[in-house]
Amino acid sequence: MNDTAPPARADRLTLLAPLLLVLSVSMPPLGGGLAKDVSQGHDILALAFLRNAISAAIMLAIVRPSFRNLTGAQWRAAAALGASLAAMNACFYLALARLPLGVAVAIEFLGPLAVAMVGARRVVDYLWPLLALAGVLLLTPLAGAERLDPLGLFFAIVTAVGWAAYILMSRHAGREIPGMTGLALALLFATLFTTPVGLPVSGPYLASFELLGMVVVVAMLSTLLPYALEFVALRRVSTALFGIMMAMEPALSAIVGLFLLNEVLSLSAVAAIALICLAALGSNLTRRDA
């Protein structure tokens, strides 16, 4: 099958690519804000499980992978990717239940920044993670931030570790498994890994058509739509531009938290988020392959 778009359509997509990129970066903060709002009074791990399950069901229906043709190495790669995805999503939601949205998203950015340090040889490559670390320290009791939940900070840091593992496992799975099959299988494994902690407490979501519909929206905003938009946009914009846009996500999350959840941040928290955004931005601008 020839997947080359007609010239006129390709031109339109090229013009729309920056807008698609903005949408793809804006959706996860909205998904996170909506998840925090929907989970009020309910177990947030159930939401993490249902998000994985719905995303997996839709991706498997779209990709329709042939399970018979998968090798043992491919299954192991998908399982490892799914484990990192499950840990990242579950810990992010646990952090979200205890921290402002902008703070939780900012801390998880330590993950990709740490990955960017692997193999670094220039002084500037170490500057950005250290700048982000300074931002995170502003959020700890060491800087007088007593209002932030220590357990929430712990879960946010574990989320960062999970995101770093997800990036590394994605590279491995991308080499082992062609196309979007790897992501579809990873979401399936993420569902299986979160079933023991999420399924037993998911009754209130499953019993309410309204709540279940909101969970579907969370899954679409947090996983499926951003991935689909990135898939189209990244063919027509540079990875450097994508990285620059991604660097704005903590700030966007803080804005969503303010307007959707009425989360007013302290000046130190705003400064911390600004430092982490600057670190992510600088890391992308000074990257050798930017």
Image: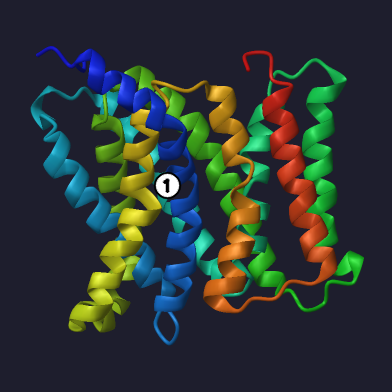
Please determine whether, in this image, residue 286 is positioned above or below residue 199: above
**In the figure, is residue 74 to the left or right of 20?**
left
Q: Position of residue 269 (x, y in %)?
A: 78, 64
Q: Position of residue 285 (x, y in %)?
A: 71, 25
Q: Position of residue 141 (x, y in %)?
A: 85, 69
For image coordinates 40% across by 54% down, the residue present is: 222
Res. 270 visible in picture: yes
The answer to which image quadrant residue 203 occupies is bottom left
For numbered disc 1, what is the local secondary structure? Answer: helix
Q: Which residue position is annotated with label 1?
A: 85
Position of the C terminus, as image quadrant, is top right
Q: Position of residue 264 (x, y in %)?
A: 70, 76
The answer to which image quadrant residue 278 occupies is top right
For image coordinates 44% across by 38% down, the residue present is: 19
Front residue of this view, candidates 78 and 57: 57
Position of the N terminus, as image quadrant, is top left
Res. 197 visible in picture: no
For image coordinates 20% across by 77% down, the residue present is: 206
Front residue of this view, candidates 155 and 96: 96
Mark 1 belongs to which amino acid? Leu
Please determine whether, in this image, residue 243 is positioned above or below residue 175: below
For image coordinates 31% across by 55% down, the residue present is: 220
**In the figure, is residue 270 to the left or right of 85?**
right
Q: Residue furthest right?
A: 143
Please determine whether, in this image, residue 163 is positioned above or below residue 8: below
Front residue of this view, candidates 121 and 75: 121
Q: Residue furthest bottom?
A: 41
Please determine whether, in this image, residue 163 is positioned above or below residue 233: below
